[in-house]
Structure formats: structure tokens, C-alpha cells
Amino acid sequence: MRHPILNRRLLQKLALLWGVIFIFTACRDEEFEPIIDDATEQTVIFFMPWSTNMTPYFEQNIIDFETAIKDGLLRKERIIVCIASTTQRANVIELRQEQGQCVRDTLKFYSQPDFTKRENITTMLNDVRAIAPARRYSLIIGCHGMGWLPSSKSRARSQYHFELDNVPLTRWFGGFTSEYQIETTTLADAIKEAGMRMDYIMFDDCYMSSVEVAYDLKDVTDYLIGSPTEIMIYGFPYHLCARYLVGTVNYAALCQTFYDFYSHYTTPCGTIAVTDCRELDVLAHIVRDINLTQEFDYALLADVQRMDGYIPTLFYDLGDYIAHLCTDKNLLDAFNHQLDVTIPYKAHTAQYYSASNGLNDIRVYSGITTSAPSRDTRSSGLKNTKWYQATH
């Protein structure tokens, strides 16, 4: 028989030990999310809202993604596609890797999906999270695009590049008409409400590499990937670049692959850039200092690099605009340095294409546009943008 005093001492030590373990565990649970070994590392959401004429091209995008999946793309990642096949229906599909093949698994559908409303995008995002919870989320949006401009119901009515006939087609953020066009602020609010900050948001749409767009989305994503010009209707070559978007993201390789593909495309034009949205507040502060002391000389407007085919121009190269605006060397140097930090990766062919006027030379390229000097009546809402308010 053991001595009773030794038994008591042993019990006291064990009680103390369990108390320490309990305290440590309680503190750890408060400070850190529990780690689940078999959790999905990344869920990539491919969002394709109704875009009038783009369903066949969306199908090609999905086929290209499937090609990459067949080649062994997925490790601990999942690909969820939300595609509006008609104005009346949108399907939620998972692209799964199975025995060297890619399988499409339809998990859910929405009837009468109105993705112009914040609450409906939020619902879709929450559904995706319930289907494929992950440590990280990324969002790819395929549709038409028109930068920061509000939907056509709230802007001057003119013909847009996506409405032209008998020309090579390019891409919109939504459909042709206002009932299918999504505001960037609506997207930002929906992501914020869902609580799903994205690693990146990639717009496979025209004119979405815009500083006004990026500033709207800076609080819901780390990076924004897009084109400052029109993008050919084929969109991103996912069969080649999906491997740089899934798993460990390689922005430099993504830009290079996009450039290589479009350098040899039927219409050899392509522009791409990656914006580090975490750097936008610093950039805005410098631009605000410039705007406080400098005034743009509109006699120089014709010399600023345009990035569209509209008359008057709607989208100008941001870096070239500031170079023409700012005469203070110290401020301009600070701006250029911060612009390089904010746009760490970019690529472009010698020319860009616009359905409105064909081929256009690129003399200067910062990878991101602004409508600040535009005299087009369609840019009249610029003062309402968060970027304008932050920089004036």
C-alpha cells in the first residue's frame, strides 16, 4: 500500500497539471481558429452572371478550366462555378478531379436569380461557403465590363463597345441592359456582408483594372486582377493560366501567360495588371496631396495615354495622367514609387484593341486607369466614387 501523504501529493500535482492544460487550451481557443487537418485550403469561386451573349464563351472558359483539372490541378482546393445559363436560372456546379478526369457536379440552382442585388450575391457566397468551406477564398468574375461606371439606368445613354456589330467581340460586368448590370459597390457590400475577404478578385471583363474600381473593392480583397482595356471575348486562357490561380497564386506567371497567349491571338492585343489593394490608401494620400497643389492643364489632354476607343475618352492611363498633372518633382517621384508598389505585376502587347475604333498604340502603360480628366458625359458620376472623395 502507498503512503496516503504521497497519494495526496500525487493527486495535487495531477490536479495542478490538468489546470495548467485547461488554462492553456482555453487561451489557445480564444486566440486561434481550430485547425482541421482535412480542410480545403482554397475555394475558387467562378461567378458568371447573365451577360446576354456570352454563354458559349463561358462554356469554353469552363472547358479550359476542366483541361487544367484533368492535368492534376487540384490538391486541397475546390472549384465552384455559379453560372447563369438563362435570365431565369443559375446553376452552382463543382468541378471535381476524379480518376484523371474532370466531373461536373450540379449542387444547387437559383430560379429568377437577380445578382444586381447585394443580398442575392451574399446568399450565393454563403451557399458556396457552406458547400466548400476553406481557409482562403478567391473570386473570378466572367462577364462584360465597364469599369467603375454606374449601370446604364443611371448614366447617359450612348452606344457601348459591347453593342457593336460586325467587329471582333470583347467582354461587361453583367449584361447589356441595366437590369443585369452589377455595380462594383454592390459587389463590395455583398462580399463584406458575407464576411469572405478574398485573396484576389479577378475580372475577366473589359475595363476593370481601374483605380476607381480597385478602391471600391480594397476592403474586401488583397489583390485585384484585370484589364485596363477591353478584353477579347475569349477571355483568360484558363487551360494555361489556371495553375497560377489555384493553390499558390503566381501573379507574375499569370501576367506572362496572358501576354504570351494574346501576343499570338487572332487579334494580337492584350493588357493585364495586378493591383495590391492594400497599398491603395497610401497611393490615394499622395494623389490627394497632388490635387491640393496642382491643377490639370486640359490643353495637354490629347497627349495623355488613352485606354479605350470612346470619343470623348472615358479611361486614361493613371500614371500618364498624373505625369501630365503634377509638376512637383518630389510629389511625382513619390507617386511613381507608390504606383510601382501598388501595381507590382503587369503586361501588355504593343497595341490594345477596342471594338469602337480598332487597334490603338500603347506608348505608356501603368496597368490601371482613371476617368479623372474625362470630359465624356458618362463620367459625370465620378465625384461620387470613393476614389475621387479620397483624393480631393
Image (cartoon, grey):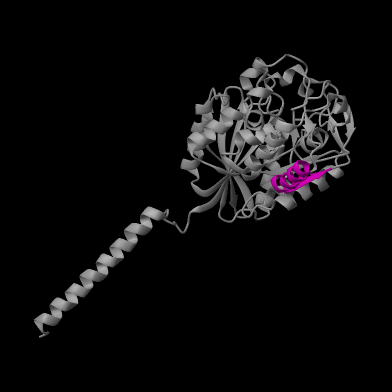
Question: How many numbered marks does the figure carry?
Answer: 0
| Residue 365 position (above or below residue 240) | above
The picture places residue 380, in percent across and down from the top left corner, at 71, 19
| Residue 48 position (above or below residue 28) | above
Residue for point 85% across, 22% down: 166
**Magenta span contains residue 88:** no
Residue 363 occupies which quadrant of the picture? top right
Is residue 204 at all visible to an observer of this figure? no
Relative to 205, 164 lies left or right? right
- Image quarter (top left, top right, bottom left or bottom right) of the C terminus: top right
The picture places residue 122, in percent across and down from the top left corner, at 50, 32
Residue 213 occupies which quadrant of the picture? top right
Q: Nearer the viewer, residue 48 or 373?
A: 373
Residue 365 occupies which quadrant of the picture? top right
**Magenta span contains residue 334:** yes
Is residue 315 at all visible to an observer of this figure? yes
Q: Nearer the viewer, residue 382 or 348?
A: 382
Q: Nearer the viewer, residue 190 or 102?
A: 190
The picture places residue 245, in percent across and down from the top left corner, at 66, 49
Relative to 368, 266 lies left or right? right
Residue for point 57% across, 33% down: 188
First to last magenta residue range: 330-348
Residue sitting farthest toward the top = 157
Relative to 230, 62 lies left or right? left
Residue for point 17% across, 74% down: 11
- Image quarter (top left, top right, bottom left or bottom right) of the N terminus: bottom left
| Residue 73 position (above or below residue 125) | below
Name the magenta segment's main secondary structure. Answer: helix
The picture places residue 76, in percent across and down from the top left corner, at 55, 55
